[in-house]
Amino acid sequence: MIEVVIDSIRISLVSQHRIVMLKEMGSERQLPIWIGPCEADAITIELQDVKVARPLTQDLLKNVIAVMGGRVSHVLVKELEEGIFHASLFVDIKGELKEIDCRPSDAIALAVRVKVPIFVAEAVMDEAGVEPEQDIQEQAKEQEEEAGPENLDIFSSFVDTLDFDDFEE
């Protein structure tokens, strides 16, 4: 299991869907997970310490677990199956750890409320994780290669054809 933190919640400019970016601790690798707008808002509200008039669904779940004598231990994004992420809540009830299947967005929204670690299975991170810095470095290298000295000949030829007297007007 790899411990992660919430790096950001983004909005896709193409589809307007929300994406939670989970960042591997001690690394630049991130796991993007598409989530719904309500779940994104629930996570953001808690991270920004916004007070709401009435409890959200995740607040209700937190309160029910506490009243029943349970304590959330951690959450785990455990599988990626046919493009769909699967997660689990791990709840300690009277010394017995129970695993409860759930959506990653709900698990994350609850985790930020009860302040427990978020984990991602290594296989999931290996399959779907991205390293933004590496992508940026690769793009820069490709652009540098495209703009090599041989490609400057075209620009030089163009400049040589210009009549700078025309620009004085």
Image: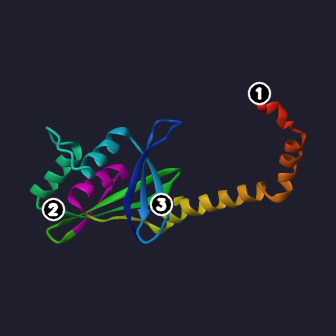
What residue appears at the point 60 percent right and 59 percent down from the top-left corner?
A: 135
Q: Is residue 19 left or right of residue 107?
A: right
- The quarter of the rendered structure image containing the C terminus is top right
Amino acid type of the residue tagged 3 in the rendering: Gln
N-term-proximal mark, 3 vs 2: 3
Relative to 141, 62 lies left or right: left
Residue 104 in magenta stretch? yes
Circle 1 Cα neighbour tier, 10 Å, few/some/many (<14 / 14–19 / ≥20): few
Reading the image, the residue beneath label 1 is: 169
Q: Nearer the viewer, mark 3 or mark 2?
A: 3
Q: Which residue is mark 3?
A: 30
Residue 127 is situated, as x and y percent measured from the top left of the image, at 55, 61
Q: Position of residue 69 (x, y in %)?
A: 11, 61
Q: Is residue 152 magenta?
A: no
Tell us which disc is closer to us: 1 or 2.
Answer: 1
- Mark 2 belongs to which amino acid? Gly
- The residue type indicated by label 1 comes to Glu
Q: Quadrant of residue 111?
A: bottom left
Q: Is residue 20 above or below residue 161?
A: below
Residue 55 vertical placement versus 3 (above, below): above
> Which comes before the other along the chain, label 1 or label 2?
2
Q: Could you say whether the residue bearing mark 2 is in a helix, strand or loop?
A: strand
Front: mark 3 or 1: 1
Residue 136, percent from left and from top: 60, 58
Disc 3/disc 1 C-alpha distance (Å): 54 Å
Residue placed under numbered mark 2 in the picture: 70
- Identify the residue at image location x=19%, y=48%: 59
The answer to whether marks 1 and 2 mark residues whose Cβ atoms lie closer than 8 Å is: no
What segment is highlighted magenta in the picture?
97-115
68 vs 139, nearest the viewer: 139
